[in-house]
Amino acid sequence: MRQSFDETTSRDFGAKHLPRVREQMAAQGLDGFLVPHEDEHQNEYLPDANERLAWLTGFSGSAGAAVVLKDRAAVFADGRYTVQVRAQVDADQFEILDLVEGGVPAYLERAPKGAVIGYDPRLHSPDALTRLQAAAARAGATLTPVETNPLDAAWADRPAQPQAPVVPHEDRYTGEAAAAKRARIGAAVAAAGADVALITAPASIAWLFNIRGGDVIRTPLPLAQALLAADGTARLFLDPAKATPGLADWLGTAVTLETPDALEPALAGLKGRKILVDPGVSSAWYFDRLVAAGAEVVRGMDPCTLPRATKNAVEIEGARQAHIRDGAALARFLHWIDTEAQQTLPDERQVAEALERFREATGALKDLSFDTIAGAGPNGALPHYKPVTRTLRRMEPGSLLLVDGGGQYLDGTTDVTRTVAVGTPSADQRRMFTLVLKGHIAMAVVRFPAGTTGHQIDALARLPLWMQGFDYDHGTGHGVGSYLGVHEGPQRIAKAVNTQPLLPGMILSNEPGYYREGHWGIRIETLQVVTPAEPIAGGERPMHGFEQLTMAPLDRRLIDVALLTADERAYVDAYHAEVLAKVGPLLDGEVLAWLEAQCAPL
């Protein structure tokens, strides 16, 4: 569980820590310094030792950045964290700005002319760095890499780097032996015109070697790097303290275990070799070292990314079973919300803790897949609100409760959102919920030809809202890993252009929503997997579709049946029948009776 940088973050961090950082900046002749949220591994969720942004500003969200200049500083967060960032950050020390609208590049365009602004090349990908360098140049400022991060030098009580045990992830969960993976990824490296691939993404390390760790909050990742040769042999750079007994035997003789300190000399020894590196996920430091070594850098996608995203039959079946198990926990939770909680009106933190208890009671939960989002009333209108002390609300009769959470199980990763009524919902609440539901159904039943991308079908989920003059400002779907990250690329469903076609085996969320600021929010999220293309009677081309994985009932009190078409009503009835058939056998007593009532035909 996260400890150091969550509820313990402090609004006076800036006043305490900014002077220390500026002192270190001055010692290096810097007029400014960039502080991204990402760490050396470009992780979304971080170990406490790498929570530089939280240490500096107090802001503990999973996306953000800061810029420190001599006389001013700014912290950036996106719309998911509007309330949280203002609750955690001292506005007297930091200007609070939007991460998406303009963001850090726009701020750098206002930097003093001639300013020298430092950055740690270990923390920025080349792709991100290019945009920042262009923005600074427009201001007449210069970005320069530093050998010693001034924030790290100022952080006297920095936690130690994690040393969580690294363990085998058995083939019965992965569906493919690590040796077979290395062979086919090695062949892909050769096909890309490279001799060796540098793998730095922890999720790719975990997937490629069939191992899991615990270095990263909410995600079973080991922090490590690897060099994979075209012949399938590999060098894995891993802290020896993390290696569990038998790990070397699990990896096999074709994999050499080396210490992290050996990585830099290994890169220096690649002179004349062609090295495949992903500029979107590997930091600029690696590129700098390879160029200095005289290696030829081949820029391309991490060769593990697509194979990891396209789940095999074993992984898909694991996902099904994980979601059925998780569905039983959700049924118990939703029953509690619909009965006891309607009387006691718990606060958001109590709601989140209850959901975690029900998941833990399965006996199979390894961790949550992210910190639970529980938004009561107006807090539900903040799409990625997280209960924090200063903003806690209780459930309120006449309002809505939005709960978004997930679990990490050995056979799969879950992520589900359900919105429920507290008391009797209004006609307006039912109307808006049903419009969101109509979009959700459209995305669940869509059929599409090979080559279709997520942004090409995103409008289907929005159309019922658009036709009434409404929309939502987040994506409709993100990829999900197999006992890995709850956010996984390259696939996604969103307005933004994404060139990655949706391929069989890819798991994505389906989560349209509507948010009425100051009142309540609605989101319906179900995970689904892309199915192989099949012919449609009378059609000419085979079409892909989605199989629903999440098994959790919808709040039927919020469904205005009159707004649904006959086909939409049939979908809801069929989905509820499937939920009851798969989850019902895991329940009994009052909870089973409640689920039967929830899943009755509309």
Image (cartoon, rainbow, N blue to C red):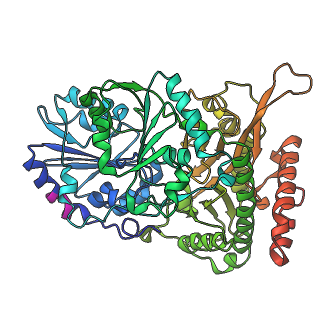
Q: Nearer the viewer, residue 554 or 282?
A: 282
Q: Total of numbered circles in the picture?
A: 0
Residue 168: give x, y in percent of width and height.
56, 57
Side of 106 where 171 appears, left or right: right
Please say whether residue 541 is one of the residues in the magenta stretch: no
Residue 568: give x, y in percent of width and height.
83, 44
* Residue 170 versus residue 192 in the image, above or below: below
Q: Which residue is farthest front?
A: 253
Q: Which of 199 and 149 is in front in this view?
A: 199
* Residue 141 versus residue 414 in the image, above or below: above
* Residue 334 versus residue 413 in the image, above or below: below
Q: Nearer the viewer, residue 486 or 61?
A: 486
Residue 291: give x, y in percent of width and height.
27, 28
Residues shaded magenta: 15-20
Residue 524: give x, y in percent of width and height.
67, 52
Side of 423 where 278 appears, left or right: left
Please say whether residue 16 is one of the residues in the magenta stretch: yes
Q: Nearer the viewer, residue 143 or 457?
A: 143
Residue under the point 68% across and 80% down: 343
**The image quarter in which residue 412 lies:** bottom right
Q: In which quarter of the image is the C terminus?
A: bottom right
**Residue 292 visible in this rendered orientation of the protein:** yes
Side of 407 where 195 appears, left or right: left
Residue under the point 87% across and 27% down: 536
Question: Main SS type for the magenta part?
Answer: helix
Residue under the point 63% across and 33% down: 454
Q: Which residue is farthest top?
A: 540
Residue under the point 86% across and 27% down: 535
**The image quarter in which residue 600 lies:** bottom right
Side of 7 where 168 appears, left or right: right
**Residue 471 visible in this rendered orientation of the protein:** no
